Amino acid sequence: MKNIRIRTLCRTDTRQLLAFELDNRHWFERHIEPRHPTFYTLHGVGNHIDEYLEAHARGKWHPCVILHGDDIVGRANLKDIDAASASAEVGYRIAEHAAGKGLATRAVQHLMELARSQWQLARLKADVTASNAASGRVLEKCGFVQGQHHPRLAFVNGDWIEGYQFARVLDQA
């Protein structure tokens, strides 16, 4: 996909983010735990953005949106940033219509660069359900190594799903 930009989430993203989440709700819920129904309102998404931006201000998260033109087609986050251990967790979600077009790889590469240059992190991790092999391939393409198996990684549609933790030591620029 051309005309892709990745930038830090802004409060002004509320309407676009709600549209993205509503359009892809069922796609995401096949792979991850569903969000609470109250999330899917302007007020709910606004609160969500406020929480993420507050965590960003405290140095605990770096939330990003992936844009194609003016439309949000994905999200990418550094989560649980821990300055003491120089580590964080990587998370991302890509719109169903944009999946398989290299956006997840670009998002992970963007997060790796943020982790190195802005947050001075040395290690990243990511959790992937066993049923989401595409995410595992994205992480491996970005230099992550599959590690520990978790028999109860996520609770989706009333069932526990197994998965794996992937990890990556970052080269310092």
Image (tube, rainbow, N blue to C red):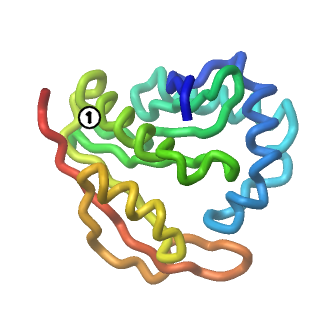
Image quarter hosting the C terminus: top left
Identify the residue at image location x=61%, y=28%: 67
Which type of secondary structure does the marked residue at label 1 adopt?
loop
Decide if residue 88 is on the left or right side of residue 104: left
- Residue 139 percent location from the top left of the image: 35, 55
The answer to which quarter of the image holds residue 36 is bottom right
Identify the residue at image location x=45%, y=34%: 61
The answer to which quarter of the image holds residue 166 is bottom left
Residue kind at label 1, given as amino acid type: Ala
Structural crowding at the residue carrying mark 1, measured as other residues with C-alpha within 10 Å and reported as few (<14), some (14–19) or many (≥20) = some
Residue in front for this viewpoint, 62 or 24: 24
Q: How many marks?
A: 1
Residue where numbered disc 1 is placed:
83
- Position of 69 relative to 62 (above/below): above
Decide if residue 116 is on the left or right side of residue 75: left
- Residue 115 percent location from the top left of the image: 30, 33
- Residue 5 percent location from the top left of the image: 52, 24
Q: Residue furthest left?
A: 172
Identify the residue at image location x=27%, y=70%: 147
- Position of 105 relative to 130 (above/below): above
Decide if residue 172 is on the left or right side of residue 32: left
